[in-house]
Image: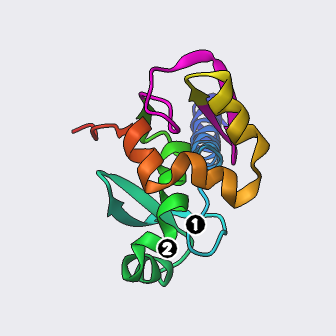
Amino acid sequence: MSIRNLSIMFSAVLAVGLVAYAAEEKAKAFKATCPVANKPALEDKTVAYKGGKVYFCCANCPKAFEKDTAKYATKANQQLVATGQTTQLKCPITGAALNADKTTEVGGVKVTFCCEKCQGKVAAATGDAQAELVFSDGAFAKAYEVKKAAK
C-alpha cells in the first residue's frame, strides 16, 4: 500500500471519528427536562414560548402544553432559564436589584437574590414549592428577560 493511499485512508477514518465525536458532544451539551412528562427533552420537539423555545420529550407533550400552558408555566419558565435562553435581571421574589453574594441553586439552576431574606425563603422551601417561588409567571416576569435570538 502506498503512502498516499495510507494517508487517504487515515484521513477518512479521522474525519468519521471527528464527526461522531462532534455529534456526541452536541448531544451531551443539550440538557433540558420536558415540562409535561419530566423526561429528558429533545432538541427537535419545541414550542415557541415567551420569545424562547420550550423543549419536549415527544410529539404529544407539546399538544398537552399548548392545551393548558398555565399548568406547565413554572416548569417551562425554569427550562427557559436552565437552557440559557434568559438573563436574570432582578430578584424573583421582590424585583429588586441583585446581590451577587446571595445565590441558591433551584432545580439545577443558579438563582440570584437581592438579600439574605429572599435567599433564605427559597432555600427553606423544597421541590415544586421552591421552583414556584422563583419560576412562576409572576416571579419570571419580575426577574428574567428572554434573550433575543441570534439572526
| Front position in the image: 75 or 39 | 75
Residue 17 place in picture, x, y as percent: 65, 44
Callout 1 crowding tier (Cα within 10 Å): few <14, some 14–19, many ≥20: many
| Image quarter (top left, top right, bottom left or bottom right) of the N terminus | top right
Which residue is at a point 27% across and 37% down the rendered structure image?
Answer: 150
Query: Range of the magenta residues?
Result: 89-111
| Front position in the image: 15 or 67 | 67
**Amino acid type of the residue tagged 2 in the rendering:** Lys
Q: Is residue 74 magenta?
A: no
Residue 67 place in picture, x, y as percent: 38, 83
Tell me the SS state at disc 1: loop
| Image quarter (top left, top right, bottom left or bottom right) of the C terminus | top left
Q: Earlier in the sequence, mark 1 or mark 2?
A: 1
Residue 142 place in picture, x, y as percent: 40, 39
Mark 1 against mark 2, which lies toward the viewer? 2
Q: Is residue 109 magenta?
A: yes
Which residue is at a point 55% across and 60% down the rendered structure image?
Answer: 75
Tell me the SS state at disc 2: helix
As displayed, is residue 67 above or below residue 51? Answer: below
Q: Which residue in the rendered view is the most extreme toward the left? A: 151
As displayed, is residue 140 above or below residue 8? Answer: below
**Residue 83 shown left or right of residue 95 in the figure:** right
Q: Which residue is mark 2?
A: 71
**Amino acid type of the residue tagged 1 in the rendering:** Cys
**Residue 105 shown left or right of residue 87 in the figure:** right
> Looking at the image, can residue 23 be seen?
no
Q: CA distance from mark 1 to mark 2?
A: 13 Å
Residue 143 place in picture, x, y as percent: 43, 36
As displayed, is residue 52 above or below residue 143? Answer: below
Q: Which residue is mark 1?
A: 34
> Looking at the image, can residue 126 be seen?
yes
